[in-house]
Image (cartoon, rainbow, N blue to C red):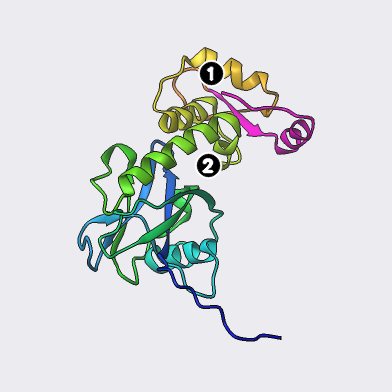
Amino acid sequence: MDTQKYCYEYPRPALTTDCVIFGFDGIEINVLLIERGIEPFKGKWAFPGGFVRMDESTEEGAKRELFEETGIKDVFIEQLYTFSDVQRDPRGRVVTVAYFALVKTSEYQLLAGDDAMKAQWFKLKDVPSLAFDHDLVLRKAHNRLKSKIRNQPIGFELLDAKFTMPQLQLLYESILEIKFDRRNFSNKIMKTGLLIQLDEKVPNVPHRAPRYLMFNKKKYNELQSSGFNFEI
């Protein structure tokens, strides 16, 4: 048996990962950025990320870098896209695998570390020009999020167990960057059969108080197994 190691005669690109973490603060969608503490692009804002180690997968590398640079851990991340433009990194030939997630900002305390000087939430509309090709990464991630939230009820996870229809509408408007007619949005959501209307109303409201709702996850799982397509 030949135990000689394979030798590759062609150059090999470096591999990095980046994490696009969207956060909902109850009013608007935010995105998590770090201020780079090293060159290239020292002092510029970018997504948490870095080089993948030889003994880890890209997802493992993404989660490690996210924790090292922001203090955030135990987040479910989903692969977004592979960015491989030849000129995307001034250090040389670097390919990055981007991941994204959607979280409640209130559930995480940021703590910058490693080569990040700061870690900060930015409102989506206030994101500055980013390092590398991260402006493109952000556009890709936001478009994916828009598509995902239209076809899957992921938005309910960003609200409290009990929520109101106006709160749910605000979430969808923030992500999709459009305004819904209040009555049409309510009717369309209620027709899905995925919401449980509670007898409890919001207290201390001067005008007509909205009722609290709950997401019926069991019902959604049942419908999904039969080919149900959630669509807003």
- Residue at 27% in and 65% down: 91
Q: Is residue 207 magenta?
A: no
In the rendered image, the vertical position of residue 61 relative to residue 85, given as above or below = below
- Residue at 29% in and 54% down: 87
For the residue pair 220 and 104, the one nearer the viewer reads as 220
Provide the secondary structure element on which disc 1 rests. Answer: helix
Per the rendering, the mark at residue 89 is none
Q: Is residue 220 magenta?
A: yes
Q: CA distance from mark 2 to mark 1?
A: 18 Å
Image quarter (top left, top right, bottom left or bottom right) of the N terminus: bottom right
Q: Which residue is mark 2?
A: 158
Which of the 4 quarters of the picture holds residue 124?
top left
Q: Amino acid at mark 1?
A: Phe
User: Total marks drawn?
Assistant: 2
Coordinates of residue 186 in the picture (x, y in percent): 56, 18
For the residue pair 153 and 135, the one nearer the viewer reads as 135
| Mark 1, other Cα within 10 Å: few <14 / some 14–19 / many ≥20 | some
Q: Amino acid at mark 2?
A: Leu
Left/right of residue 48 with respect to residue 183 in the rendered view: left
Q: Which residue is mark 1?
A: 185
Image quarter (top left, top right, bottom left or bottom right) of the C terminus: top right
Query: Where are the magenta residues, as a range?
Result: 210-232
- Residue at 43% in and 62% down: 66
In the rendered image, the vertical position of residue 161 relative to residue 94, given as above or below = above
Is there any visible trace of residue 51 in the rendered image?
A: yes
Coordinates of residue 127 in the picture (x, y in percent): 28, 43
Left/right of residue 156 with respect to residue 85 in the rendered view: right
